[in-house]
Amino acid sequence: MNKIKILWADDEINLLKPHIMFLEQKGYDVTTINSGNEALDLLKDNYYDILFLDENMPGMSGIETLNAIKITTPNIPVVMITKSEEESIMEEAIGSKIVDYLIKPVNPNQILLCLKKNVENKRIITEKTTQGYQQDFRSISMQINDSMNFNEWIDIYRKLIFWELKLEQSQNEGMEEVIRMQKNEANNLFCKFYEKSYENWLISKDENKPILSHTLVKEKVIPLLDNSEGPLFFILIDNLRYDQWKVIEPIISEYYRVVSDDIYGSILPSTTQFARNALFSGLMPAEIEKKYPKYWMNEGDEGTKNQYESELLGEQLRRFGKKTKYSYNKILNLNSGKKLLENLNNLYSNDFNVIVYNFVDMLSHARTDMDVIRELAENESAYRSITTSWFEHSPLFEIIKQLANHKMNIIITTDHGSVKVTIPSRLLGDKDISTNLRYKQGKALQFDKKDVYEIRDPAKIYLPRINVSTSYVFAKETKYFVYPNNYNYYANFYKNTFQHGGISMEEVLIPFIYLSAK
């Protein structure tokens, strides 16, 4: 590895000889000079990893040198060293974007720590992150292969997301591949667990069974609503995965304190039509169809499948005896987001305000259909990055900041996540088969049994039956359904896109976050 090159400008550089020798013994390459002008001259034709700059030099001062360097060599890290403890000098230096500020007399270990923090930090982070994951790898593998309950799977998923994000920052491609393989192994076993347990969860009276879409409002939202001292805002960002929440969390944390960071389970199919209607109604889809037939639309029916969410929420609140004054706003585009922001004050007189924000779902589908988006979000890391970029510049973020200014508590959640599909699975059905790539409902379905969770009797999992021979199949892990006609074209077209509707940790283990304003 090449030596780290240091440029040190100080008019009393000879007095710092012991420090120079210490750094050279540690393997650093140190160039010493006596003035700001010399620093500027050397930086024109030479590369240095970091500059130590004395603030009080004759001729061109440290601050003047710093300002000139930021024009000619803006990317070099600069550490200001000074005898002065005047606050104005510190603020001027910090305002000029120095990376560190040291007060004389400095000792060699201070300098060493400064170098490790500002030059070697990426290497150190990579090494320590790799070591940490390697130590946790075995315990995660053992836990994955043990018989686990729902909460233990949540714990595994949290760990995998934690290490995935840490290793992504360290840019260790080898270890990133290892975490992907371990995540795939976990998904394989998680799908078997979900398939084995799902029907029982829907009929069980056990108080410890998982919270799913249709029980979320009863179990999590109403208790918060009952204890809320002011208006409660419920923000549902469609298709928001837990890893996407973790990358926008630092942005929100400037304004909000995370009171609880929970994960609940999406019902099947893990799509907006089924999971979100179940969430707002407090009922499974077949129960909605039976109890509120005018609010339920099946696959072949014309019209939007989620146009009655507000009415279903009102019915659920009334069933639980809540005379709650509530509002419901669905944001489908930038203009409607801006309009809601302008009229946000009108919602403060309500007890409960629901905001459904569809952007992440639009991004997921746009990534499938638009070449530009496909390039911008070609992998998991890029998908998270584009979500973060959108959020930082969205009306939703402005809404959240305004709510924080008014000390409003908020919930951030979703109805389902999405998974990057990589393995095509052949499927054949009649002309009325549903179009989703991760689940199918229809008659006479033909498929590879190992790729799916099959439900021949939809009533077992409270799903509508279009006709007497309707069945459902749900793709597992990262598989996606492709018809035999023109198979290779569609298999390639949809490969590596983000889809939802089936069973994977990314689709069904989803965030429920409660935040209080700082």
Image (tube, grey):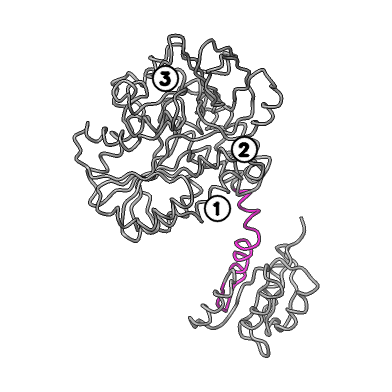
Quadrant position of residue 429: top right
Mark 3 crowd level (few <14, some 14–19, many ≥20, 10 Å Cα): some
- Point out the tag, 2 or 3, that comes first from the N-terminus: 3
Helix, strand or loop at label 3? It is helix
Q: Given the current orientation, which residue lies at the most extreme bottom position?
A: 59
Mark nearer the viewer, 3 or 1: 1
Q: Residue 56, position in %: x, y?
A: 61, 85
Q: Amino acid at mark 1?
A: Ser
Residue 151: image location, x then y, percent: 40, 31
Q: Which sits in the foreground, 313 or 266?
A: 313
Q: In 3D space, how far apart are the residues under numbered discs 1 and 2 (Cα atoms)?
A: 20 Å
On screen, residue 288 above or below 81: above
**Residue located beneath label 2 in the image:** 369
Local SS, label 2? helix
First reached walking from the N terminus: tag 1 or tag 2: 2
Q: Name the residue type under label 2.
A: Asp
Task: Say the numbered circle drawn on residue 389.
Answer: 1
In the image, is residue 455 part of the stretch drawn in magenta? no
Compared across the picture, whether 298 is left or right of 101 comes to left
Q: Residue drawn at (24%, 48%), measured in percent from left and top?
A: 351
Residue at horizontal 66 percent and vertical 53 percent from the top: 123
For this orientation, the residue located farthest to the front is 302
1 and 2 marks in contact (CB < 8 Å): no
Residue at mark 3? 197
Q: Position of residue 289 (x, y in %)?
A: 34, 22
Describe residue 14's horizontal placement relative to residue 251 as left or right.
right
How many residues crowd mark 1 within 10 Å: few (<14), some (14–19), many (20+)? Answer: few
Query: Relative to residue 49, is residue 382 drawn left or right?
Result: left
Judge left or right: residue 105 versus residue 260. right
